[in-house]
Amino acid sequence: MKRFLMIGTAGVLGALCRYFVGMGVGVFWGADFPLGTLIVNLSGCFVLAYLTTYLFRLTILNTDLVVAIGTGFLGAYTTFSTFTLEAVRLFESGHTISAVTYVGLSFLVGNLLAWLGFRLGERRFMRKREAVKEGDV
């Protein structure tokens, strides 16, 4: 039951963060291009990759907390359904270049950020493991 409450609470926080980022970006950028969703999804790619290769591998974290962050917060923070809906709307409204740019950036930059998150997380994890072996914690 505790795990479910943690996931639910993290999910609420992730959804609120997604909403506020989208709203904040929309105020400055406008609604012609779904930059808020792009920022949310790209940052989610990086954060989940980083966390899975660093924080989630450390044994100091509670399993319930790992699931709450990964599934709850980041699951609610990022949004594939909104991404696809916005891409279809851009195509249907005749903004083909914006639609292709949005889909391309989401895929290419999302994968690049996930790769970067994995690399940075792995590097930090290995440094932490070496420090523990040397007693420099």
Image (cartoon, rainbow, N blue to C red):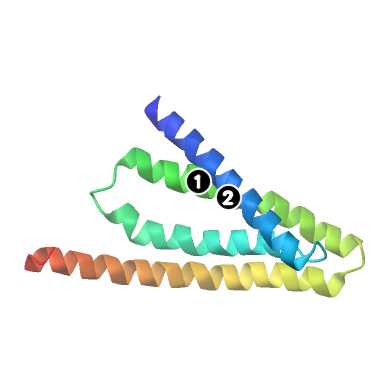
Q: Which residue is mark 2?
A: 17
Q: Position of residue 92 (x, y in %)?
A: 90, 60
Query: Mark 1, residues whose alpha carbon is within 10 Å: few (<14), some, or many (≥20)?
Result: many
Residue type at the position of mark 1: Phe
Q: Is residue 136 left or right of residue 17?
A: left
Q: Quadrant of the N terminus?
A: top left
Query: Mark 2, residues whose alpha carbon is within 10 Å: few (<14), some, or many (≥20)?
Result: some
User: In the picture, residue 26 is in which quadrant?
Assistant: bottom right
Q: Secondary structure at mark 1?
A: helix
Instruction: Name the residue located 60 percent from the left edge and 59 percent from the top edge.
Output: 40
Q: Is residue 21 left or right of residue 34?
A: left
Instruction: Name the residue located 8 percent from the left edge and 68 percent from the top edge.
Output: 134
Q: Quadrant of the C terminus?
A: bottom left
Q: Which residue is mark 1?
A: 73
Instruction: Name the residue located 63 percent from the left edge and 56 percent from the top edge.
Output: 21
Relative to 49, residue 2 above or below: above
Earlier in the chain: of badge 2 and badge 1, it is 2
Q: Secondary structure at mark 2?
A: helix
- Asked if marks 2 and 1 touch (Cβ < 8 Å), the reply is yes
Q: Is residue 20 left or right of residue 9?
A: right
User: In the picture, residue 24 is in which quadrant?
Assistant: bottom right
Q: Is residue 39 left or right of residue 133?
A: right
Front of the two marks 2 and 1: 2
Residue type at the position of mark 2: Cys
Q: Position of residue 3 (x, y in %)?
A: 40, 32
